[in-house]
Amino acid sequence: MLSIPGQSGSTCDGFSRREFLRVGGAGIFGLSLGDILRLQAAEATAAVEGGNKNGWGQAKSVIMLFLQGGPSHIDIWDPKPDAPSNIRGEFKPIKSNVSGIWLSEVMPLLAKQMDKATLIRSMSYTPAGLFNHTAAIYQMMTGYTPDRVSPSGQLEPPSPSDFPHAGCQMSRIKPPSVSMLPFVMLPRPLQESNVIGKGGTAGFMGAAYDPYYFYQDPAGDVKLDDLSLRQNVSKERFARREKLLDQVNGAMPDIEKAVSNYALDSYYQKAFDLILSGRARNAFDLAQEPAKVRDRYGRHTFGQGCLMARRLIEAGTRFVQMNWPAVANGNPVVDAWDTHAANFGPLRDLHCPKLDSGLSALLEDLDQRGMLKETLVVAVGEFGRSPRLGVSTSGN
């Protein structure tokens, strides 16, 4: 549960961001649909009385930068300059462009963009069962502990009985207003060891609300065959196929239609529209971006993935999740955040330079394009470093 210290309640401007973050228990930050509806009703009343000035209801889309593997928050954006050396670590704090907010020295670019962000340094939760990456990822993405869906615990593959990812909920409740993919996950699945995709599906909501899984390196040559017309199929021929499908569906017995659990007819229509419009295909095409912009994000998987996320949101996608491009419990000296034995070297030389360029460029770019007011950018991991060096991070 997420709890923010301070006096609860609303002001004449409606419910504050602090109060919004106080409510606990659906994906990402534990908000249930009931909580959201209750806050919306209260906010509507407050808006009539005093107007809405705190931003509730402005966000239309989400970019989730999920740093799977357990990034060390203390060594990235929550430095402890006055703590003993066995807590604060090797890095020095640096000032940001907001008075009183300090970051670690490994995030100099983000420090210049902190006026566009908010640090939530009080977030915590208690996992149930095993304290591992899979359990934590599942709880962060769905809002539920894995023991709610399996008596055997956390280390199981995705199941139709899983609780849905928050992005899948958004796909159902607030689909795009244009022919666009509602939820895209890139560039690799949520993964710990051989457990792949847990917490990253629509679960019991049905496959129709699963994300579009774009498991390719956005910094490399991207293939979009499934979003393109085949060379021997013209738009006219493809449109005729759509009409034929309509005729077949119209001839189906009513009882056969009634047993459809996933609303696939509407998704066939959306697939036709996606391919014919070319909107999604163009959004994935980073070659349309100036070289200067691509360089600013960083010519690496994470940086180019952040740029692709911005393009997808701009094209109409509601929810984009950019997973850190490494297995959660991978090798820290290669590409993973799981820095149990090797922390400061990999953070300084490998991970933080990529995180710094990608995240700072995304915030700056969204702001310059006027998109930041309507886009919620969330950068978070499934847990962080213990407050003392040499102590296992498991369960924190």
Image (cartoon, rainbow, N blue to C red):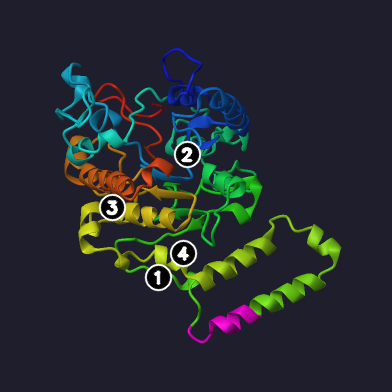
- Mark-to-mark CA distance, 4 and 1: 13 Å
Residue 356 versus residue 191: which sits nearer the camera? 356
Label annotation for residue 223: 1
Q: Which residue is mark 4?
A: 280
Q: Which residue is mark 3?
A: 303
Residue 266 versus residue 230: which sits nearer the camera? 266
Q: Which residue is mark 2?
A: 58
- Mark-to-mark CA distance, 3 and 1: 19 Å
Residue type highlighted by circle 2: Gln
Q: Earlier in the sequence, mark 2 or mark 1?
A: 2
Crowding near the residue tagged with mark 1, few <14, some 14–19, many ≥20 C-alpha atoms within 10 Å: some
Please tell me whether the stretch drawn in magenta is mainly helix, strand or loop. Answer: helix
- Mark-to-mark CA distance, 2 and 1: 34 Å
Q: Earlier in the sequence, mark 3 or mark 1?
A: 1
Q: Earlier in the sequence, mark 4 or mark 3?
A: 4
Give SS at disc 3: helix
Q: Nearer the viewer, mark 2 or mark 1?
A: 2
Q: Is residue 83 magenta?
A: no
Residue type highlighted by circle 3: Gly
Residue 50, compared with residue 137, is above or below; it is: above
